[in-house]
Amino acid sequence: MRRLTLIAFLVVGIALPTPVMQAQFIGAPTHDDFRDTTILRPPAGSKVAIIVFEDLGCPACARAHPLESQAAGQFHVPLLRHDFPIPAHIWTFEGAVYARYIEEKISPKLADDFRGAVFSAQAAISNKDDLHKFAQRWLQQHGQKMPSVIDPAGALAAKVQADFDLGLRLNVTHTPTIVVVSRNNYQVVCGAEGLADTTQFIPILRAAIQQTGTAPGARVRK
């Protein structure tokens, strides 16, 4: 789990709340430092969802990525991915913009595959030039051509920034932050101090589904 040591300077002047005990689906209540927990809700029409804040340069996010997709597919619950590019990672914001381009202009499935490929290639990507070459090659391998300008009006960058701002509003301090949510409750899998055991992911999700009587539904991003 990557601790976001640089987030502090982004939120200077905002008083940190006293950690509270959070009711959850299984196990003893735990502490978290989340602020606006109204963010932690499933989309309309769903009783349970998985919410993820991730950074494409985070090794822990790379390990969690396939588990999240597997869980969403296995239990037919929405998976809401939010980009949270760490400021110290100089290429990950642009990487998120590329993923958004693929999602909106080509297909959400290919965008998921691209994110997975970037996670697997983290060690080979050190800067924006490396990322550009990787993305260009990857798109060619998948029968697509990268445009000369990915985001001419800045609309995709604005969406990535909106995700990052949403994470600040929640007070995300670790990547990945993974939360299983219902309409009235949530449980942190990763993203709070001392919570990084992804082996608890499936038991937590199963408990949430049982407690809400969730019927299988479609998987959506947002």
Image: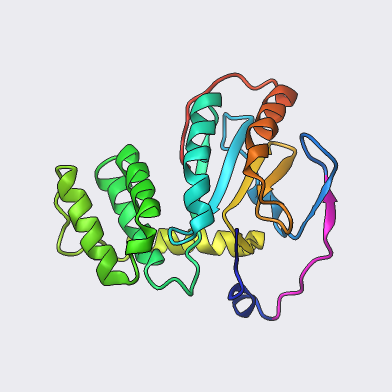
Where is residue 24, by image quadrant? top right
Q: Which secondary structure dominates the residues rendered in magenta?
A: loop
Report the residue at 47% width, 64% height from top: 85
Asked if residue 197 is positioned above or below residue 133 in the image, the reply reads above
- Classify 28 as above or below 123: above
Compared to 197, does 147 lie above or below? below
Q: How far across and how far down the image is residue 22, in percent?
A: 81, 47
Image quarter of residue 111: top left
Image spot of residue 197 (x, y percent): 67, 46
Residue 114 image position (x, y, % from top left) = 32, 48
**Residue 86 seen in this snapshot:** yes
Q: Is residue 16 magenta?
A: yes
Give the magenta part as a residue range: 13-22
Colouring: rainbow
Residue 54 is at least partly visible in this image: no
Residue 88 shown in magenta: no
- Is 200 or 169 nearer to us in this picture? 200
Q: Quadrant of the N terminus?
A: bottom right
* Residue farthest to the front, as pictured: 123
- Residue nearest the observer in this picture, 38 or 30: 30
Task: Identify the residue shown where x is 56% and y is 25%.
Answer: 75
